[in-house]
Image (cartoon, rainbow, N blue to C red):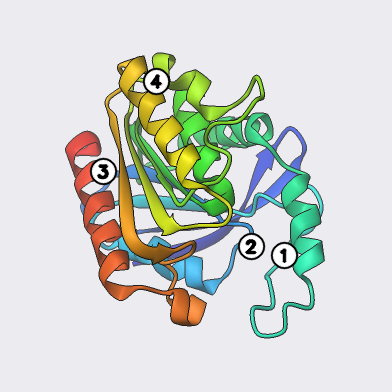
Amino acid sequence: MIEHHIDIQTTEGLMGSFICHPEENGPFPVILFFMDAPGKREELHDMARRLATTGYYVVLPNLYYRTTDHFELDFETGSNVEEMFTLMAGIGNRMVVRDTEAMLNFLKSDDNADEESIGCVGYCMSGPFSLYVASAFPSQIRAAASIYGVRLVVDADDSPHLGFPQTKAELYIACAEHDEYVPLEMIEQVSTEIEQSGVNGRVELYEGTHHGFAFPGRGKIYDKEAAERHWERLHALFDRNLR
């Protein structure tokens, strides 16, 4: 496995990014991995590696780069949770579109990346980013996933659901049954929006799970069976559309 820590130039600064891909038989289809609110950390690096080992070029950027070179939530004490919410409130869908454009431009410089075959995935905070990016780059993003993503249907002109009719990617939206950030009403709304828009996508409710179920570092919230199912879904989604 080849791994790099690279600063990607954006219009607003240098975006520190973790990049990994296999050593041989490239170029590889690309997966843009958008971090969750607790920050770009080793837990996410390991998840990126899991995707990369099956033949993908994975880019995991620090979306908080405009404010800090590094942030990681202290899960044990929660001492910096307010800082996390401040950082989270400081970014949005349109900003991540600009960051994605920078990543797409960067991919042109690396022969290991197949810039004609790109997918993306986002967790929690970044679930809506992944879906919004798919609608913003319909000719480039072939598959997009949101895993317990928040704010999927909101009263805003950049709500992800408004982009469904323009989206050409296959969409996969995984939701936890018990999620204080994503009520069941929102899950029903996004299901209706997908059906009415005609986009190729589906919503899957993971019964009995809680927000964050796919992260091994979340203690009792982690649900191994559900986490492995989410990996199965992601691999199938990307293999169908990026290979």
Q: Are marks 4 and 2 in contact (CB under 8 Å)?
A: no
Which secondary structure lies at badge 4? loop
Amino acid of disc 3: Phe
Question: Quarter holding the C terminus?
Answer: top left
Residue at image mark 1: 70
Tell which circle, 2 or 1, labels the residue nearer the N-terminal end.
Answer: 2
Q: Which residue is mark 3?
A: 238
Badge 1 element: loop
Give whichever of 19, 97 is nearer the camera.
97
Mark 1 neighbour class, 10 Å CA radius: few under 14, some 14 to 19, many 20 or more: few
Contact (Cβ within 8 Å) of mark 2 with mark 1: yes
Q: Amino acid at mark 2?
A: Gly
Q: Residues within 10 Å of mark 4 (few under 14, many from 20)?
A: many
User: Would you say residue 171 is visible in this rendering?
Assistant: yes
Note whether 50 is above or below 109 in the view shown: below
How far apart are labels 4 and 1 at the CA level? Answer: 32 Å
Residue 157: x and y in percent read 65, 19
Could you say where residue 102 lies in the image, as x and y percent from the top left? Answer: 60, 34
Provide residue 211's location: percent of width, then percent of height: 49, 61
Report the amino acid beneath label 4.
Thr
| Corner quadrant of residue 232 | bottom left
Which label sits on residue 35?
none
Q: Which mark, residue 167?
A: 4
Tell me which label, 2 or 3, sits earlier in the chain.
2
Sequence-wise, which precedes: disc 4 or disc 2?
Answer: 2
CB under 8 Å between discs 4 and 1: no
Image quarter where the N terminus lies is bottom left
Q: Residue furthest bottom?
A: 76
Q: Residues within 10 Å of mark 3 (few under 14, many from 20)?
A: many
Determine which of the numbered discs, if any, sits on residue 39 in the image.
Answer: 2
